[in-house]
Image: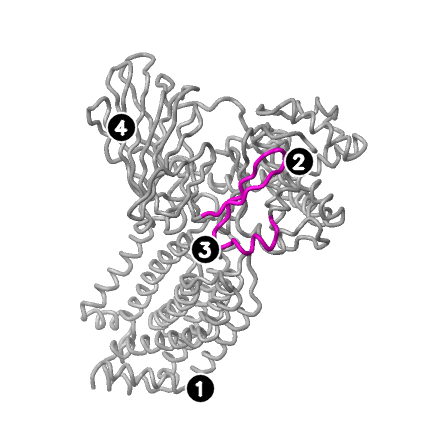
Amino acid sequence: MTAAAKLSRETRRVLGERLTWIVIALTAAGAVWFSLNGSGRTASDAYIINAAKGSAFLGALLFSLLSLAQLHRDYKNNTDAIVLTCTDPVRHQVRRTLALVGVAAATTLIISLFALPFGIVKTGGYFQPATFLTAWILIFFGALVFAVLLSTGLYMLTKRAEAAFILIAGLILLSKMLETWLLLNPSYLFYWVQTTAESFSDLITNQFQINMLLWNRLFCLLVSLGVWLLGLCSFRRYGRGLLGSFKANCRRVWIPLLLAVAFSLSGVSYAFEPIFDDSKPADLGAAIGSSGGASSVISYSISTPKVGNPDLTLRDKSFILELCTGRQTLSGTAKYRLENVSGNAQTLPILVNTGILIDSVLVNGVKLKAVRGETGEGSSASWSVMLPSAAKYEIEIAYSGSVRNDNTMTQRAQFGIAEGFIWLPTLGVSPKLDINVAEDSDFSGTLLLDEGLEPIFSKGKAKKVSSGEGKAEWRYNGAAGRQGDGFFAAEYLTKTFEAGGLNIDFKYFRKHDGAVAEMDAVSVMKAAIDYFTRAYGPLVYSKNLTMLELPAYFAGGFAAGNISAMDETSFAAEGCLPAESLSPDTGGGIDVLVHEIAHQWWGLGSMPVPDGVSNWSAEGLTCYGAYCFMKQYFGEEYANERYMKAWQRGWDTYRNAFYVRHPEYLSKLSEKEVSNVIASFVSMKQYDLMPLMLLRGEEALGGTEAFRKKLSELYKTHIMKPITYQDFLAVTGLTEEAIKLA
């Protein structure tokens, strides 16, 4: 009988057992339940991704039990000696494992008969085949395969079903518990039942998350195979113990060879994981106060940041950047004109994204060597070039690679290049010289993008100048005195309207066209911009303001330059209601939208500067402003429920936090742990504590209207200027005691 025939017979035997069909039925029933009761920020998350994630945990547990039952049955029935004398022991274990993997594949196929039409119906026009395959093949089926390999490998290693079950159940529980162990900052590669990829977009490609899943599944497959091969090496032969069986099994050289290869490749895949880097956490350790008070945890500086070499000054910069969405890579050339104050030989410090390599450097026409230094904060890699003595330099830097993401806080694949969407940070667009920049310096660039993609910069604008052969050329002119800007690129549609005396360009994804029109998001934006203009004063922009839609995996929003951006969930149907509607927001979308609009006044139009002692920040003023708008837009009851109660919960959490009450214990944590703890404190102080202090300011001044007039005076007298906490107190006439939280 051929090997294929024996495998087919073993598979039929497994499928002929009642226990197998019970496991298949329970797994399928669980998948249906998770699909019907799914939730998430997008339709793809709610009805596809999260359903597969929940089903993966149930399926992994059930298939582990099935695998252990199949391998333990011969030993339990005392027929193992008979079976193993009639067939090759090693091949028998291989066949049983492959048969179980076949059952897992059949289960996935059966579930897909329900999950596919269900996902299509529930997501409608937002359905993406790649997202469905990612959910049910990579996440769900991958978890079943790993469960089979790990459980069979552990059983062959221990020869005890109860011990193997305890181990595999512990591994399943560990994969789930990693989600709550944020202080440990565990690698996303260790989530073997599922992964940390979340917030899948309904509107554009999810290639960033798919890349994470592919690498995660590669690592987990190699580790699972390694455990299984280790078990195969240790499988007990009749009359032999562990050591004797190991020697006998390893006479087949391919088994220990594959074992070594599997574990070696798993180590290589972990070490050379391409999505995240080894960025250093932000240096917050020095900010730990010695006074023992909670308010002295963070320290900020409003002084001008130091540059790597102050003897060099940048006069102008230009770059040409080409992006290949198919290979997810970029290549470019940047040209710089520098002045050397001393005229002596200099070291040129260069900063670039950690995933990008400097291919060559020409200085005044002479090729010089660039040396890679250490990785810094925020995915920045430092390079240096030794410059000869000269008064001026003409420098040309060629670079290429694929951008990488910061891993120090939450491992989210934000930056990257994919077909249909590009998101590059400043250091991913072109190398930055860590030197002085002349205030009148020129900054320009040329982008070569796929036809149909429109680049959106936070500073300056890009103009399309030509197109052909599937590529379009865009010319970009940046703000003077700068040498870098990140950008987004996607297929955007534009809707223009007037609000606050400005022309507003609302740029949203093409796939969202019909839904945006139905939910009347423009009315919400117009109402918010008009409200803040009346409340505080006009914005400084003379021409236009851009409202930009981002994918769901951005998870929030930002405001920079004349752009307010928010992710697609801000435009959920229940999140952007027309102004005359009496129904409040139940999805949270409008909250983010209004918050980012308010940042145009607090954070961009004026610059509240944190001091490290008080809770003063632009975020606090923005949260308070959004609360005031919501109180008018939806009523006081809604604003109190969604804002005031949340702030109070944050204040209760903060004042009861262990490291707030005992800051001396922070010194016992690692640098990364300190960074994560302090970052969480900063968030609560900015988003919760300060808005509560501003509400106390309302009471002290006699009401909302009196306080609003003071904030308007503060804004108008500090347009495009820093605002300190003392400036706020001076303009409002408040004292620290009057707004201090009890």
**Residue picked out by circle 1:** 18
- Tell me which residue sits at (34%, 13%) in the image: 341
**Residue picked out by circle 3:** 197
Q: Are marks 4 and 2 in contact (CB under 8 Å)?
A: no
Three-letter code, disc 4: Glu
In percent of width and height, residue 727 lies at 66, 23
Is 287 drawn above or below residue 629 in the view shown?
A: above
Is residue 697 rendered magenta in the image? no
At numbered mark 3, what does the secondary structure look like: helix, strand or loop?
loop
Label 3 vs 2, first from the N-terminus:
3
Is 685 drawn above or below residue 240 in the view shown?
A: above
Label 3 vs 4, first from the N-terminus:
3
Quarter of the picture containing the N terminus is bottom left
Q: Quadrant of residue 40?
A: bottom right
**Residue picked out by circle 4:** 396
Three-letter code, disc 1: Arg
What residue occupies the far top of the structure in this picture? 342
Q: Nearer the viewer, mark 4 or mark 2?
A: 2
Q: Nearer the viewer, mark 3 or mark 2?
A: 2
At numbered mark 1, what does the secondary structure look like: helix, strand or loop?
helix
What's drawn in magenta, residue-wise? 492-521
